[in-house]
Amino acid sequence: MGLDNDHEDLLNKLQEIAKRKTANNRYFTEFTGLIGELAVCKHFPCYTWEPDQGYDAKDKQSGKKIQIKTRRLQTSKNLKGGRLGRFGSARTTDEKDCYDFELGNLVVLDYNFNIAEIWTLDMEEIKCLEGRAKERKKNSGKDQKLSGLNLSTFINNKKANQHIHGNYPSARESLMRTYP
């Protein structure tokens, strides 16, 4: 298993508190990223949670560093139109990006802060996607602050691997269950 007992207890406690905080449709995102990181490490037994500058976990078998981004279905009715935090380190168009990981995971959490889906792309593809977005922003002459990728850009990428979790056959089905 990718999590030791202490980390698994932490994940369970964070999920429990987050569910309480979101009762009665209250907006609460403070734990979402951490829950996603820990949940992915629990899902993939070869992952160990080792957060450091530029990555969140390591694959014990391959030694690859993994960056994990998390979204919860209930934060937007337009999940695929939402944005991720940037994988690269640059926050403005004039900063140089650093990508200190080999794999990027996007984890989608359901209403109860459990994994609905995980999507994986390699760092080179993410770097290319963010690089094109950065160039478009730079050429627009507008605000130089960078945004992360749209979820649809990540999810619809032909190179992305999808890992379905639980009883969710797809992101669409997850959304339909969430917003009947």
Image (cartoon, rainbow, N blue to C red):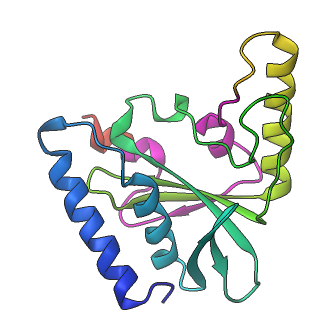
Which range of residues does the magenta coloring cover?
146-174
Above or below residue 67? Residue 136 is above
Hey, which quadrant is residue 156 in on the image?
A: top right
- Tell which of 159 and 49 is nearer to you: 49
Indicate whether residue 124 is drawn in magenta.
no
Q: Residue furthest top?
A: 141
Q: Residue at point 40% right, 53% down?
A: 32
Q: Residue at point 34% right, 62% down?
A: 114
Q: Residue at point 68% right, 37% down?
A: 153
Hey, which quadrant is residue 9 in on the image?
A: bottom left
Indicate whether residue 171 is drawn in magenta.
yes
Quarter of the image with the C terminus is top left
Location of residue 95 in the rendering, given as x and y in whole percent from the top left corner: 83, 36
Location of residue 167 in the rendering, given as x and y in whole percent from the top left corner: 35, 63
Above or below residue 39? Residue 107 is above
Location of residue 112 in the rendering, given as x and y in whole percent from the top left corner: 26, 56
Hey, which quadrant is residue 141 in on the image?
A: top right
Location of residue 24 in the rendering, given as x and y in whole percent from the top left corner: 11, 38
**Position of residue 52 in the picture relative to residue 110 (left or right):** right
**Position of residue 111 in the picture relative to residue 97 (left or right):** left
